[in-house]
Amino acid sequence: MTEPLAASPIQKPAVPEGKFVHLEDRGDVLVRDFGGSPGAPTVILLHGWTASADLNWYSSYRALGEHYRVVAFDHRGHAAGLRTKKAFRLEDCADDAADIATALGIDSFIPVGYSMGGPIAQLLWRRHPDRVDGLVLCATAPFFSNRRPERLSFLGLAGLATVARYTPEQAREWLTEQVYLQRKSEQWEPWAIEEAASHDWRTVLEAGKAIGRFSSADWIGDVDVPTSVLITMTDRVIPLARQVKLFEMIAQAEAFRVDGDHDAAVAHADRFVPTLLRALDSVARRGVST
């Protein structure tokens, strides 16, 4: 009788080791804390919706770690992120980031927000201004829905989130295929599937609803720290005009452009990573000079 073939282990990209950080009244979070020489600025990487820290940033880890102390973790409901019965709030994600920094003994830092991470970075500045040395905002905007079809789309996520509460397995399977895997990379496809399948999809869908409701239009112009806006020029998710609007609303922000779609951090890492380093260097340099 022929023995069944053992499944091949899933190939994963090399990522830094993680450690668990305890957040009081919330639980433990797996955090990657690496790189940086003594005195190097600290950056906190904030990933996009339906992704994870590793899916969003694995192509950037090595280069960033050569220049900065890097902290990365998954947001609530995403991959290894916190699990909670509370409704998802972007404000809570901002507080999570600040509290992780505190637990690691980090006084101040530069939030680097990609897509959904952009609002979280903006809220970090608003809620914890004494902790934020600068901002790098990538493929993101000051608001995400201002037209009726967009509003209806984001509101529809609330209904899907309710379904996910009662049929989580079916919702997980369907959404893993439909939402994240549109952006899968061929090389890491099995790993991407495994990573996305570990989401708490009820929370992830609530996150989509929160993104649709977010707007910093009334206060983003008050940002008073060095800021770089990294614009993905052929983005089909966050319209170019909306990314440019973010840049225009922040006085003395500097713009950095990448020829790529919304998945540029992975699909065009050869262009994205050097641009991200320039954007960070701009923030760090202007912070020292003030």
Image (spheres, rainbow, N blue to C red):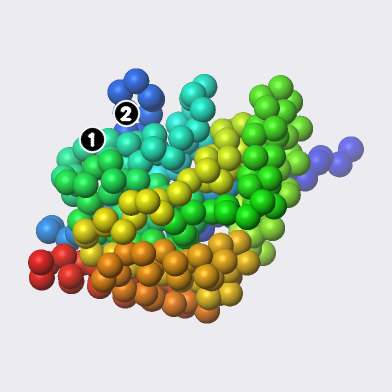
Q: Nearer the viewer, residue 246 or 63?
A: 246
Q: Residues within 10 Å of mark 2 (few under 14, many from 20)?
A: some
Q: Secondary structure at mark 1?
A: helix
Task: Quadrant for residue 185, please give it.
Answer: bottom right
Q: Secondary structure at mark 2?
A: strand
Residues under numbered marks 1 and 2 in contact, where contact means CB atoms less than 8 Å apart:
yes
Which residue is tagged 2?
Answer: 22
Image location (x, y in percent) of residue 222: 26, 56
| For residue 42, above or below residue 139 | above
Give the residue type that dot 1 points to.
Ala
Q: Nearer the viewer, residue 148 or 237?
A: 148
Residue 111 vs residue 178: left or right?
A: left
Residue 199 vs residue 15: left or right?
A: right
Residue at coordinates 47% horizontally, 60% vertically from top-left?
140
Residue 278 vs residue 236: left or right?
A: left
Label at residue 103: 1
Q: Gap in Å between the C-alphas at discs 1 and 2? A: 8 Å
Give the residue type that dot 2 points to.
His
Q: Nearer the viewer, residue 12 or 219?
A: 219
Q: Nearer the viewer, residue 134 or 36?
A: 134
Task: Quadrant for residue 156, please give it.
Answer: top right
Residue at coordinates 58% horizontally, 40% vertically from top-left?
209
Residue at coordinates 26% horizontally, 71% vertically from top-left?
252
Task: Quadrant for residue 12, please give it.
Answer: bottom right
Q: Quadrant of the N terminus?
A: top right
Image location (x, y in percent) of residue 76: 47, 36
Residue at coordinates 81% horizontally, 40% vertically from top-left?
3
Image location (x, y in percent) of residue 103: 23, 35
Among the two numbered marks 1 and 2 on one chain, the one whose residue lies closer to the N terminus: 2
Res 207 visible:
yes
Res 51 visible:
no
